[in-house]
Amino acid sequence: NAGVTQTPKFQVLKTGQSMTLQCAQDMNHEYMSWYRQDPGMGLRLIHYSVGAGITDQGEVPNGYNVSRSTTEDFPLRLLSAAPSQTSVYFCASSPQPTGGAGQPQHFGDGTRLSIL
Amino acid sequence: AQSVTQPDIHITVSEGASLELRCNYSYGATPYLFWYVQSPGQGLQLLLKYFSGDTLVQGIKGFEAEFKRSQSSFNLRKPSVHWSDAAEYFCAVVGWGTDKLIFGTGTRLQVFP
């Protein structure tokens, strides 16, 4: 059971380039989310999804797009990378939305992204 | 708006000493509360959680936390710290009716032999 798998683990981009961070989970979890982690700021929610076909914005959504075509996958897209998006990105999943059922989230190991 | 505060950015303890990491939250009702640990280069691992009932909750790796409504706190404790406990610790809160987990800024724990 792999849990939450994120790829790639590391990536360097130039300003203006686009890329997709992949996230897959094999636990049949309905709820998935993306966070970014920056020094001194904890984790901040970018986007989340309560099920296939349903996504919503979190605290810091600007510059990022998401889609959820399957239960397993929740990719995060940077359309035009900016240096301010240099961060560590974490994907997480849980059986149900955390607030509704108090389910803890399972986290991937992160993608370390640098924008030059 | 809900928020969570971890007032200690960095804590250093000697191996074998006791540990208390502070967490304060702001929310009118009883929130769902979590403590996560992050080892270097890793994702977050759940240590323990509080939903309701007994205000002292036990977690993995010998950690416990106590919910104190009067102080809006959910402090994490361990009676004897091991060198392998060196990591960053995050407190998180989510309120009833929302789907969003709000994290504190984290406390980095350093353990000296």
Image (cartoon, coloured by chain):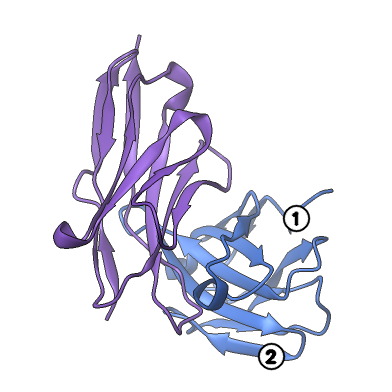
Chain colours: A blue, B purple
Residue B82 in sight in this render = yes
Q: Identify the residue shown where x is 73% and y is 65%.
A: A23
Q: Chain of mark 2?
A: A
Q: Nearer the viewer, residue B86 or A115?
A: B86
In the image, what residue type sits under mark 1?
Thr
Horizontal and vertical percent position of residue B71: 15, 58
| First along the sequence among labels 1 and 2 | 1
**Residue named by callout 1:** A5
Relative to A13, residue B14 above or below: above
| Res B30 quadrant in image | bottom left
Horizontal and vertical percent position of residue B54: 38, 52
Horizontal and vertical percent position of residue A113: 57, 57
**Residue named by callout 2:** A54
Query: In whole angstroms, how far apart are the C-alphas of marks 1 and 2?
Result: 21 Å
In the image, what residue type sits under mark 2?
Ile
Q: Chain of mark 1?
A: A
In the image, is A43 to the left or to the right of B72?
right
Relative to B19, residue B90 above or below: below
| Res B88 quadrant in image | top left
Q: Identify the residue shown where x is 69% and y is 90%.
A: A54
Q: Answer yes or no: do the residues labelled 1 and 2 have beta carbons within 8 Å?
A: no
